[in-house]
Image (spheres, rainbow, N blue to C red):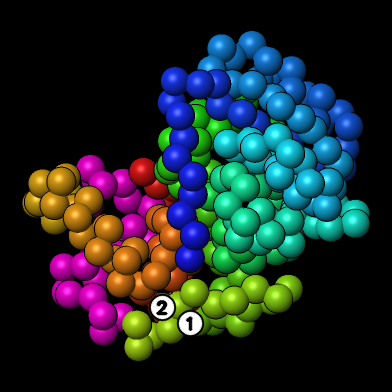
Amino acid sequence: MSEFRAFDSAAPIRVLIVDDQHLVRSGFTMMLSVEDDIEVVGDVQNGELALAAARELAPDVILMDVQMPVMDGIEATRAIVAADLGRVVMLTTFDRDDYLFDALRAGASGFLLKNSDPEQLVDAIRSVAGGHALLAPEVTTRVIAAMVGAGAGAPTTPTNGSTSLGSADQISRLTDRELEVLTLMGRGRSNAEIAADLFLGEATIKTHVSNCLAKLHLRDRVQAVVFAYEVGLIRPTESGSHPLG
């Protein structure tokens, strides 16, 4: 599993925008152009062009639409993450995107609604560029519920060529405390919230989180959420909110 390249916090965050609608690309570009620490380095209209642009432009964060012609956002995300070409935030609307759970499996670092406020867009880019995973509160429960369906809490069947992250026998690799931490991560708790829940120091929680990710071969906290749902630790109704940091 490849490691994401280091992000230089002293330089502007380089952003590539990928969407098949010109107005959407233009709108995001305008929103971001006023931020001193963000630079839009390009915009393209499909996943195939996104892959080429990522190789050429070396973006830190890629805002990626899901449904596009030629190559969709999930296939493009899988290729971009595999080649370590940047961190991907999926752009989504509730009513037409059916494969968001697959996007997480493909390696997306989070979701962002297309109608998000400018402040949310900027915060998401900064968070993901800094190495954090982000799930918009409005997205998390619906995505998991839609993909897990009536068998909520049971392992899901991958679709669209994706690979399942979780199997129940992997749980045996974790200590009891690590299992508690993983369950709380699956509910969207931050390190500080987990520390408060378990009456432990935040540094201790960070160690447990790192151990969970290493033992389960997960890239980040987004994949930890996916894993928790796939092995039945968490049901959709238990989903929390929020950025995972």
On screen, 177 above or below 203? Answer: below
What secondary structure is marked by label 2? loop
Q: Residue at x 73, y 73 (%)?
A: 160
Q: Say which amino acid is labelled 2.
A: Gly
SS label for mark 1: loop
**Image position of 241 with respect to 173: above or below:** above
Residue 239 locus on image (x, y percent)? 43, 58
Q: Do the CB atoms of the residues marked 1 and 2 lie less than 8 Å apart?
A: yes
Which disc number belongs to residue 154? 1
Rounded to the nearest whole Å, what is the CA distance between mark 1 and mark 2? 5 Å
Can residue 138 be seen by looking at this rendering?
no
What x and y, as percent, mark residue 200? 9, 51
State the image quarter where residue 16 is shown. top right
Q: Which residue occupies the foreground of this view, 148 or 178?
A: 178
Residue at the spot 32% in from the left edge and 50% down from the top edge: 189
The reply to whether residue 61 is visible in this rendering is yes
Q: Amino acid at mark 1?
A: Ala
Is 114 located above or below residue 40 in the figure? Answer: below
